[in-house]
Image: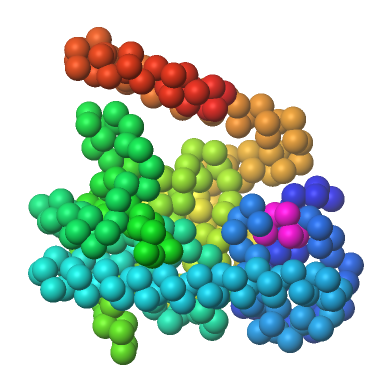
């Protein structure tokens, strides 16, 4: 059996809410833990693996050195999440004091939601917060006034091309970088509009932190992975993304589920997720779904095919970018000047894409 598929199956059994602990107990000692740790690290779910094993009472069946390593990573993440949650609360208070309508997104919303059994079971990168576009500069300036600054030196892109968020900010006084969003996706989807997310936000008990409704959380969770992280384009699965889906699915009703599955990106995501998690509903088996499933299995079975397909998609993506930028390069003399001045960085960027 293919190593990738086997490892994905083993991890899915560990983190699934449906897999019986007695089933795992009988088989867990035979798992290839080197592969599981490697893939778990790549997918940023080592703390999740530890938390789910703990919840199922299976940690005692692990070798001691493996147990200690997983616990160490989990404890680090739990401590980090405590600091991040305090930072989220501070940002919330600053924006409230300045009448900035806002809602926290993705990982920040998930750890604030109390949807997880343990605080440390989900890894979190940046703190993403959505505000109305007309208030985005004001929100950005509030963070600047509180000691945040550019997380890295700005490139020329923000000067000419609008992103879905303003420049990423970081502070030496706080652990998390912050992105002020006014858009949610690189390609707009009718099912997920920023104004709808803001208008239908919910508030977490006790902390009163604003987070998206469960419908918008699961929709953004999937579409962010499929569109922004190119899950649809490269036809691959994300285990952290799947786990968030598992956590959120019990909080949406069947009518909402039917609605979100009308989106082709979400149906593609659920299709691959269902291969490993029975909790994730299987979408209607359309011709597109059959094709994507076949390609996915071929990629898992043949590493050379997977590598070739990835390279083809990467080259096509780069060519599309170069075509669009070349037109703008010819049209805009200020852009031409900035590109020529920044050519060393751009050459390095193109090389990294290849």
Residue 303 rendering spot, x and y as whole percentages: 75, 35
Up the image or down, 79 lies above or below 312; here it is below
Answer left or right for 143 relative to 43: left
Classify residue 295 by image quadrant: top right
Answer left or right for 36 relative to 86: right
Asked if residue 262 can be seen in this view, the reply is: no
Answer left or right for 60 relative to 77: right
Residue 257 rendering spot, x and y as whole percentages: 40, 67
Residue 201 rendering spot, x and y as whole percentages: 24, 72
Residue reaching furthest right? 30
Asked if residue 128 can be seen in this view, the reply is: yes
Q: Name the one closer to the observer, 221 or 294.
A: 221
Is residue 206 rendered magenta in the image?
A: no
Residue at image position (81%, 62%) is: 33
Up the image or down, 309 lies above or below 149; here it is above
Residue at image position (51%, 79%) is: 119
Q: Name the one closer to the observer, 147 or 56.
A: 147
Count of numbered marks: 0
Residue reaching furthest bottom? 206
Q: Name the one closer to the observer, 192 or 89.
A: 89
Residue at image position (35%, 71%) is: 87
Q: What is the quadrant of the C terminus in the image?
A: top right
Residue reaching furthest top? 330
Answer left or right for 6 relative to 179: right
The span shown in magenta is 36-40
Residue at image position (13%, 73%) is: 97
Is the stretch drawn in magenta largely helix, strand or loop?
helix
State the scheme by which the image is colored.
rainbow
Residue 171 rendering spot, x and y as whole percentages: 35, 58
């Amino acid at each position: 059996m293919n190593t990738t598929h086997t490892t994905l199956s083993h991890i899915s059994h560990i983190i699934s809410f449906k897999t019986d602990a007695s089933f795992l107990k009988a088989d867990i000692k035979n798992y290839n833990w080197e592969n599981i740790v490697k893939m778990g690290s790549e997918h940023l779910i080592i703390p999740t693996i530890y938390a789910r094993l703990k919840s199922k009472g299976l940690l005692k069946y692990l070798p001691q050195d493996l147990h200690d390593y997983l616990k160490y990573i989990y404890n680090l993440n739990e401590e980090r999440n405590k600091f991040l949650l305090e930072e989220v609360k501070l940002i919330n208070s600053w924006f409230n004091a300045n009448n900035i309508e806002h809602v926290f997104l993705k990982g920040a919303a998930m750890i604030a939601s109390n949807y997880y059994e343990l605080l440390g079971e989900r890894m979190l990168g940046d703190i993403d917060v959505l505000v109305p576009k007309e208030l985005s500069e004001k929100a950005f300036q509030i963070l600047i006034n509180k000691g945040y600054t550019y997380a890295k030196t700005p490139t020329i892109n923000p000067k000419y091309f609008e992103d879905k968020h303003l420049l990423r900010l970081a502070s030496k006084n706080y652990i998390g970088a912050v992105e002020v969003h006014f858009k949610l996706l690189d390609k707009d989807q009718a099912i997920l509009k920023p104004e709808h997310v803001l208008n239908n936000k919910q508030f977490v008990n006790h902390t009163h932190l604003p987070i998206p409704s469960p419908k918008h959380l699961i929709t953004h969770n999937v579409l962010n992975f499929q569109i922004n992280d190119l899950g649809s384009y490269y036809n691959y699965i994300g285990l952290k993304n799947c786990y968030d889906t598992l956590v959120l699915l019990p909080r949406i009703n069947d009518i909402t589920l039917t609605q979100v599955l009308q989106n082709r990106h979400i149906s593609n995501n659920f299709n691959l997720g269902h291969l490993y998690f029975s909790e994730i509903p299987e979408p209607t088996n359309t011709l597109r779904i059959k094709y994507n499933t076949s390609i996915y299995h071929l990629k898992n079975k043949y590493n050379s095919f997977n590598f070739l397909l990835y390279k083809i998609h990467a080259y096509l993506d780069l060519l599309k970018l170069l075509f669009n930028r070349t037109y703008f390069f010819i049209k805009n003399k200020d852009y031409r000047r900035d590109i020529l001045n920044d050519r060393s960085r751009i050459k390095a960027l193109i090389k990294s894409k290849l």
